[in-house]
Image (cartoon, rainbow, N blue to C red):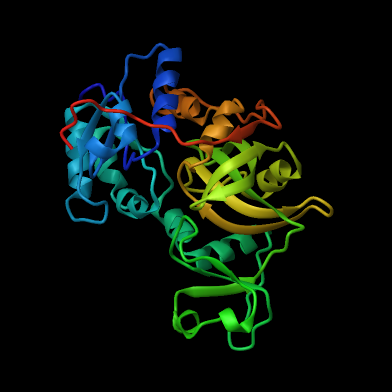
Amino acid sequence: MKNMKNILITSAGKRVVLVEIFRKTLKDLRLSARVYTTDMRPDLAPACIKSDGSFKVPRCDSEGYVGRLLEICREFEVGILIPTIDPELMPLSTNRRRFEELGVSLVLPDADFVRICRDKRLTMSFFEKKGIIVPYPIDKHHPSFPLFVKPYDKSRSVDAQVIWSEDELSKKLLDDPKMLFMEYVGNDYKEFTVDMYFGRDGQVKGIVPRERMEVRAGEINKGITRKNYIVDFIKDRMGYLEGVRGCICVQLFYREADHDVKGIEINPRFGGGFPLSYYARANFAEYIVREYLMGEKIAYSEDWLDNTLMLRYDDEVIVYDAKA
């Protein structure tokens, strides 16, 4: 078998910072490995242009997607595959054995956990089993306002909205079988995303709560790390998760006055706001490289910086004489 040492970040799109984090991590650890990327249009994906090499792939829900990734991994000595979008998680996790037979480590949870995360109804049940309360459901035929609606199978806040009065509760919403109707969590709560890293042993190695001060298109635009009650709360309830490995992000609401926590959803992948945790010195990319390429064991650590503020802005990648 070849020396499978390189990293492949799939559906890379705009994730330039994630690519740069892994490249810097490899350099700091003095490893002669490359960070490759894939996308449907790598010529139009900034992260692909910034990576060490990129490859065109079909849609992640197409029949040939997994096969194409296996070809890339085999030819370019990929040892670690990092997925970044929700729709590819199930196709990849259900084909884990095919990658492992090639010597490729998929850094994502097993299919059973991915399935829980992809269906918000199952996510709510998971939280409750772990002793984490969730927003209470509302009977859509006898509603109280305000309330919150969202589909159980979408991400990035797609179609999620607050309904303030009966006038806004359309027939389309009421007839949509995928819509969940639930309590609207008030302004006395703050919204958090908690970045968590799980080792190959299913034990959590890092927990970083990020307060979502401003969100754009479902992704954090302004945020700050908070080393608060949430750390121990989550560790006590989710310190070990069978079949979970790599980075996941847990979304929740937190009321500081009485330490009330309400679980919302889980994304079993790197979150779009992970760069904030990285700049606060929680380098989960280094954890991955040390575990999967260097064969090291990772210990739990809270050695990251509290009150690290991230303010995002738009930037550009310029390509001269482009063939797009």
The residue at the point 66 percent across, 25 percent down is: 303
- Which percent across, then down, holds residue 26? 40, 18
Rendered residue at 72%/47% (across/down): 233
Please name the residue shown 69% across and 64% down the image. 185
Q: Is residue 143 left or right of residue 315?
A: right
Q: Nearer the viewer, residue 23 or 48?
A: 48
Front one among 98 and 136:
136
**Where 8 falls versus 190 (above or below)?**
above
Q: Position of residue 202 (x, y in %)?
A: 52, 41
Residue 290, percent from left and from top: 46, 23
Establish if 256 lies above or below 126: above
Rendered view: 296 above or below 129: above
4 displayed left or right of 248: left
Q: Quadrant of residue 205?
A: top right
Residue 30 placement (x, y as % from top left) = 40, 11
Quadrant, the N terminus: top left
Q: Is residue 139 visible?
A: no
Q: Is residue 173 above or below residue 127?
A: below
Residue 88: tell me if it is visible: yes
For residue 24, which quarter of the picture? top left
Return the residue found at the far top.
Answer: 30
- Residue at left offset 54%, top offset 62%: 123
Q: Residue furthest front?
A: 321
Q: Is residue 20 left or right of residue 313?
A: left
User: Quarter holding the C terminus?
Assistant: top left
